[in-house]
Amino acid sequence: MDILVTFDENYILPFKTMLKSFVASNSDTKNTFWLIHGGIKEKHLQDLKKFCNSQKTDFKHICISEKYFESAKITKRYPQSMYYRLLAAKILPKSLDRILYIDPDILVINNLKKLWEMEFPEGKVFAAASHAIIGNLTDNINKLRLDTDHSYFNTGVILMDLVKAREIVDMEEIIKNINESSDIELLLPDQDIFNSMYGKYTIEIPDELYNYDVRFYTAYLLNSENKHDLDWVMKNTCILHFCGKKKPWRSRRYSMFSSLYKYFMYK
């Protein structure tokens, strides 16, 4: 499997934790992690390579020059890094025909082979989850806000058909859309742009399997009529996503999956 990540030096520890959990569940395949970054120091890159190799995974990185985005809106709210996953099809080598993007604030607790090998229906280029568990009201607001007729996809996990994506992803159009949008229009800039421009090319995958928002255990449980309890999650869910501002590596606050995260972190 080829896995894409994008982060800066502040997310090195969470990335290592995610990778440790990934390897524990996906040791039956040859795996390569691709990092797109804006200038992580060489000593850290060497450390990452050494760590990945120790976990029997390959590590490759692509450093993007600031000149690459000289015409794009770059501010604290719109950092250069927000463009990386949107433009992954243009940045990654053409030898790759698909990639699985994963946020670093994630644990992988079951095998991802079924997701990795899924076939894309005609006209679909991406696969992502919508987090509709949060409620139809939020989904409807996002549809109205972005003038879309599909679910609002969370971009923390995206399977990409890179061959098809290279045909539709337009760097100039992405930059134009971001530059012309006001802050009030884009609440989550890169996620909003993905939904408004590429949501129609995205097939929805079940979030309870591939992008489980750990903040909403009770909602998942009630929505499934008590089927998706902790035992079900540990047996069936592949990806736990620690969404929101309170991250388990920073906070001492206990949540349903904090102990599991700390287990992999201290490994």
Image (spheres, helix red, strand yellow):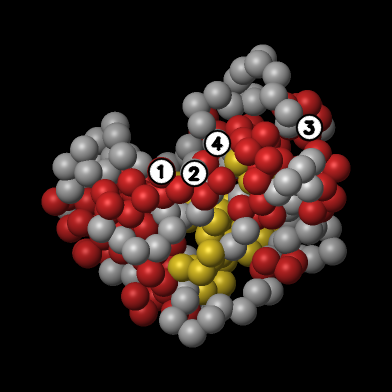
Marks 2,1: beta carbons within 8 A:
yes
Amino acid at pointer 1: Thr
115 or 206: nearer the eye?
206
Q: Residue at x 31, y 39 (%)?
A: 187
Circles 4 and 3 in contact, beta carbons < 8 Å: no
* Amino acid type, callout 2: Gly
Q: Secondary structure at mark 4?
A: loop
Graded by Cα atoms within 10 Å as few (under 14), some (14 to 19) or many (20 or more), the crowding at tag 2 reads few
Residue placed most toward the observer, 240 or 1: 240
Which kind of residue does numbered mark 3 sit on? Leu
Which residue lies under the disc numbered 1? 138
Residue 51 % position (x, y): 72, 43
Considering only order in the chain, which callout, 4 or 2, is on the residue closer to the N terminus? Answer: 2
Q: Is residue 89 visible in the rendered structure shown here? A: yes
Question: Cα distance, mark 2 to mark 4?
Answer: 16 Å
Cα distance in 3D space between marks 4 and 3? 15 Å
Q: Secondary structure at mark 1?
A: helix
How far is mark 3 from mark 2, CA to CA?
Answer: 27 Å
Q: Earlier in the sequence, mark 1 or mark 4?
A: 1
Q: What residue did someone put label 2 on?
A: 135
What residue is disc 4 on?
243
Q: Are marks 3 and 2 in contact (CB under 8 Å)?
A: no
SS category of the residue bearing label 3: helix
Residue at position x 69%, y 24% in the image: 255
Residue 84 in the figure: left or right of residue 109: left
* Nearer the camera: disc 3 or disc 2: 2
- Marks 1 and 3: which is nearer the front? 1
**Location of mark 3 (residue):** 260
Circle 4 residues within 10 Å: few <14, some 14–19, many ≥20: some
